[in-house]
Image (cartoon, grey):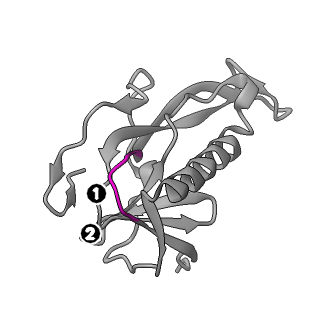
């Protein structure tokens, strides 16, 4: 049995802002060859996450977990999110894509804290296992971002 990823800190949403919820993945246009070099064809194909636009609401919480930011909704659902607009992986960013994205997201978190749209908080427990976007696969031509998310009173409908 895997241990859950520890939560390093919680940040409560004070005012709405847009995030990108990971809803699956699609094959990228980047491959890794036998010498572990990124290429546009041949070898092992990498994956891009697929996202939907989501408007956070007061009562939601962002959680700092190793290697990702999780959104925990008011009803306890949790899902990985990205705060900066998603970009597809490229040959030039094949091995740095995730790290660069996470660094940009944390810079945006600092801005949201300074603006008062996020506030430090006690970490809230989730009511279920986090959604795993690797379990949902889309075709290679699927859009990287879907424009709207359907929301209920207590959170999004996936």
Asked whether 139 falls inside the magenta stretch, the response is no
Left or right relative to 32: residue 129: left
Left or right: where does residue 13 sit relative to residue 43?
A: left
The x and y percentages for residue 125 are 39, 80
Is residue 5 something that shows in the picture? no
The first of marks 2 and 1 along the sequence is 1
Asked which secondary structure carries label 1, the reply is loop
Give the residue drawn at x 37%, y 47%. Answer: 17
* Above/below status of 53 relative to 110: above
Q: Residue furthest top?
A: 40
Q: Is residue 108 left or right of residue 17?
A: right
Q: Are marks 2 and 1 in contact (CB under 8 Å)?
A: yes
Please give left or right for residue 106 compared with residue 141 in the image: right
Q: Is 108 located above or below residue 153 in the figure? A: above
- Tell me the residue that label 1 is attached to: 57
Task: Count residues near mark 1 (Cα–Cα under 10 Å), then give few for <14, some for 14-19, many for 20+.
Answer: some
**Residue 74, numbered label:** 2
Q: Can you name the residue that lies furthest to the front here? A: 115
- Looking at the picture, how far across and down is residue 124, in whole percent? 40, 79
- State the extent of the magenta-drawn residues as a range: 13-20
Residue 17: say if magenta: yes
Distance between mark 2 and mark 1 Cα atoms: 9 Å
SS class of the residue under badge 2? Answer: loop
Quadrant in the rendering for residue 2: bottom right
Q: Nearer the viewer, mark 2 or mark 1?
A: 1
Near-viewer residue (95 or 70):
70
Question: Toward the viewer: 115 or 119?
Answer: 115
Front position in the image: 5 or 17:
17
């Amino acid at each position: 049995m895997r241990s859950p990823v520890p939560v390093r800190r919680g940040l409560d949403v004070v005012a709405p802002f847009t995030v990108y919820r990971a809803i699956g993945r699609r094959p990228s246009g980047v491959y890794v060859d036998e010498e572990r070099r990124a290429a546009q064809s041949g070898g092992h194909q990498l994956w891009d996450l697929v996202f939907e636009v989501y408007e956070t609401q007061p009562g939601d919480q962002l959680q700092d977990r190793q290697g990702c930011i999780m959104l925990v909704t008011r009803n306890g659902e949790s899902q990985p999110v990205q705060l900066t607009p998603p970009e597809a992986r490229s040959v030039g960013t094949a091995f740095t894509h995730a790290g660069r994205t996470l660094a940009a997201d944390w810079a945006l978190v600092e801005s949201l804290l300074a603006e008062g749209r996020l506030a430090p908080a006690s970490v809230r427990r989730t009511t279920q296992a986090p959604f795993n976007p690797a379990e949902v696969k889309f075709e290679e031509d699927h859009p990287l971002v879907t424009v709207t998310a359907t929301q209920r009173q207590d959170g999004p409908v996936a």
